[in-house]
Image (cartoon, rainbow, N blue to C red):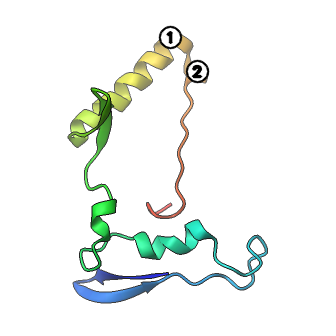
């Protein structure tokens, strides 16, 4: 899976190659891992439309763009309220990244 991205102002081919020694996928690329190249941010191949460039929050029944200040305030406020009501053990953070965000 490949893509054309800009690196230091130059267009370069980004290629994801499977690890032949990987026991998990028997040397083959996983669909999620291999597609990282294909889905990386690129104005050249048009994948930028599939990538977020600003934070979004769930409001009014859907995801809407917001400022970084608002998104961080919201995360901090939710965290504060959970800790106040349930204590520190009530706070659980679940994050998923398959490498596309720098993992």
Secondary structure under badge 1? helix
Residue 9 located left or right of residue 27: left
| Residue appearing at x 39%, y 71% in the figure | 40
Residue 63 located left or right of residue 23: left
In front of the other: 52 or 73: 52
- Label 1 packing within 10 angstroms: few (<14), some (14-19), many (20+): few
Secondary structure under badge 2? helix
Farthest front residue in view: 61
Within the image, what quadrant is residue 75 found in? Answer: top left
User: Which mark is on residue 90?
Assistant: 2
| Residue appearing at x 42%, y 16% in the figure | 81
Residue 7 located left or right of residue 87: left
| Residue 79, horizontal then vertical, whole percent | 43, 25
In front of the other: 84 or 51: 51
Contact between labelled residues 2 and 1, with CB atoms less than 8 Å apart: yes
- Label 2 packing within 10 angstroms: few (<14), some (14-19), many (20+): few
Task: Please tell me which of labels 1 and 2 falls first in the chain.
Answer: 1
| Residue 39, horizontal then vertical, whole percent | 41, 69
**Residue bearing the label numbered 1:** 85
| Residue appearing at x 29%, y 29% in the figure | 59
Distance from label 1 to label 2 (Cα)? 8 Å
Within the image, what quadrant is residue 31 found in? Answer: bottom right
Residue 89 vertical placement versus 103 (above, below): above
User: Which mark is on residue 39?
Assistant: none
| Residue 56, horizontal then vertical, whole percent | 30, 42
Residue 57 located left or right of residue 91: left
Residue 58 vertical placement versus 6 (above, below): above
Residue 100 vertical placement versus 86 (above, below): below
| Residue appearing at x 57%, y 66% in the figure | 32
Farthest top residue in view: 85
């Amino acid at each position: 899976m490949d893509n054309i991205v800009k690196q230091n102002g130059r267009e370069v081919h980004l290629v994801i190659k499977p690890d032949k020694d990987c026991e998990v996928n028997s040397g083959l690329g996983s669909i999620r891992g291999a597609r990282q190249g294909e889905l990386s941010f690129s104005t050249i191949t048009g994948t930028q439309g599939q990538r977020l460039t600003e934070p979004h929050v769930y409001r009014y029944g859907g995801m809407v763009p917001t400022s970084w200040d608002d998104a961080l305030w919201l995360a901090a406020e939710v965290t504060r309220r959970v800790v106040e009501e349930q204590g520190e053990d009530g706070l659980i953070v679940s994050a998923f990244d398959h490498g596309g965000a720098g993992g």
